[in-house]
Image (spheres, rainbow, N blue to C red):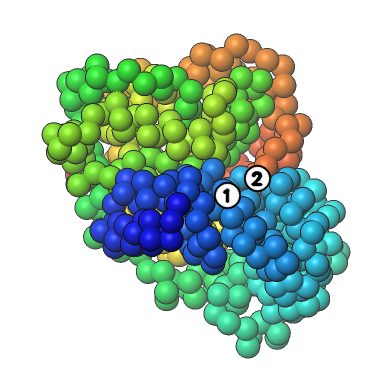
Amino acid sequence: MTSEQAAQLLRMFVSALERRSRLDVNRAAFALLEGSPPLGKNWHALAKVMQTNGEYAAANLAMDRFAAHRPNDPHARFLQAAMLAQTGRPERAWEILDHVPFGVPTPSEHHYLRGTIAVNLGQLAQAESNLLAALDSEPGLGQAMLSLAAARKRKAGDPIGDRILAAGPIMAKAPAIERAHFYYAAGRVHFDRHEPDAAFAHFSAGAELVSTWRPYDAAADQRDAHLCRTGFDRAFIAGINATITTDTSAPIFVTGLPRSGTTLVEQILVSHSAVVGGEEMGRMALVQRDLPAPGAAGLSRHIGAGTSADDLASLYVHLCRERFGNDGRFIDKAPEASRLMGLIAALLPDSPIIWLRRDPLDCAWSAYRTYFAEGLDWSWKLEDIASHFALEDDLFRHWSSLLPERILVVDYQELVRDSAVQIRRILAHCNLPEESQVFRPHETQRVVSTASVMQVREPINTGAIGAADPYRRHLEPFIKRYRALSKPS
């Protein structure tokens, strides 16, 4: 590839980014990757865009080129390792980090990346060692405290829990984001120690702080809940289904409100020999980005413009295969897929859907005490949680009534109380033969990158049922708002 051809493709790439044309961005990026011109640091920028577009193989290939351009720069290797970790390749990321000197780019950043990778791999002793080293280098690193608090329960006498709680004076002068992480970490420690007032005070302080830069737009949430289902009736869905020739039997959707048990069901299914992996992928949201509008009207307009529904189904499967390879079935754990359920039902006719339901108060309390790194901005205030839950209840009633044969409803309380019966229901719905290991999902070793990382390492148990009861007085704002919104009109 000549330098002029490379420059022209770069201009096309930037122009496509400005126009927000995912297809044109990808075309230009793939052409650059094939030609392999000397783009220097631009390979890093291209890799980040490919990561955003769900093209993980292309993202990591671009990072290979970036690192090759700077062979003697350990910072480039560190960035390459970070990309591998973020795209679901933690083992390879760890190998790359072994060639990066400790202290690059800084001691705290280096140890923190190692620590988070180790948490996700279930290597808790290694994780604690690295995360504590990150704190030694940067005592105000709230995100390291939060990872430590999430790694295992910090009951009374746990020295790491004690260290987190003692960090209050240091954190008073820390940046706002690190203070928020600290509040959530300290809240988790108090929660593990059955200290309700202190736990709630810290979670509330963290939530109030985050809400100042990540406010909840209730009106937009209501509009989205209305538009996402508009036009998706049984006739429309059946008409689109009839045009799909892509094999859509590999995906299994596990959905429900965050903290409703979706990660547990994902872990159960990933324990099966026919399932190669699972995580919150968000790939259907990428497909939706290509549509000119939400709802069935947006899908119809897109098809009318020359793209077939089958192309969209194929795109979704391709993006998932970028993460999990070309063989086996996979789990798309999609909390709140209620907003994408019309597209899922229409474009993926052979993909089973499992919808988790949990006691609203327990679910609300669990969401409130969880720091969500992105999205879910309804979780900072109890009244907003109630408003969002009411919208989701309405969407659940709509979709489960419209698609009763596609959606298996699983109650979290029943799942943990009578797991064998519920697991058999899940396997049957997914057309998976029974295997003994799925009844012992905590024994399955895999990467877990959600807020439920600690829970999936434990045997199925009923410990989370009624977890909100000691906090009922604090949760009154949620209870009142949710009851008012749940009354029949």
Which residue is nearer to you in this view: 344 or 11? 11
Residue at position x 80%, y 48% in the image: 123
Residue at position x 22%, y 33% in the image: 307
Direction front: furthest residue: 2
| Label 2 – label 1 distance at C-alpha | 10 Å
Which residue is nearer to you in this view: 85 or 190? 85
Q: Is residue 205 visible?
A: yes
Q: Residue 207 at what x, y percent from top left?
A: 50, 69
Secondary structure beneath dot 1 equals helix
**Mark 2 vs mark 1: which is more N-terminal?**
1
> Residue 172, relative to residue 103: is it above or below?
below
Instruction: Give the residue at mark 1.
Output: 60
Residue 384: image quadrant is: bottom left
Q: Tags 2 and 1 in contact by the CB under 8 Å rule?
A: yes
> Residue 349, relative to residue 472: is it above or below?
above
Which residue is nearer to you in this view: 347 or 462? 347
Q: Residues within 10 Å of mark 2 (few under 14, many from 20)?
A: some
Amino acid at pointer 1: Asn
Secondary structure beneath dot 2 equals loop
The quadrant of the picture occupied by the C terminus is top left
The answer to whether 173 appears left or right of 36 in the picture is right
Q: Is residue 260 visible?
A: no
Instruction: Give the residue at mark 2.
Output: 89
Q: Residue 60 at what x, y percent from top left?
A: 57, 49
Q: Residue 304 at what x, y percent from top left?
A: 13, 34
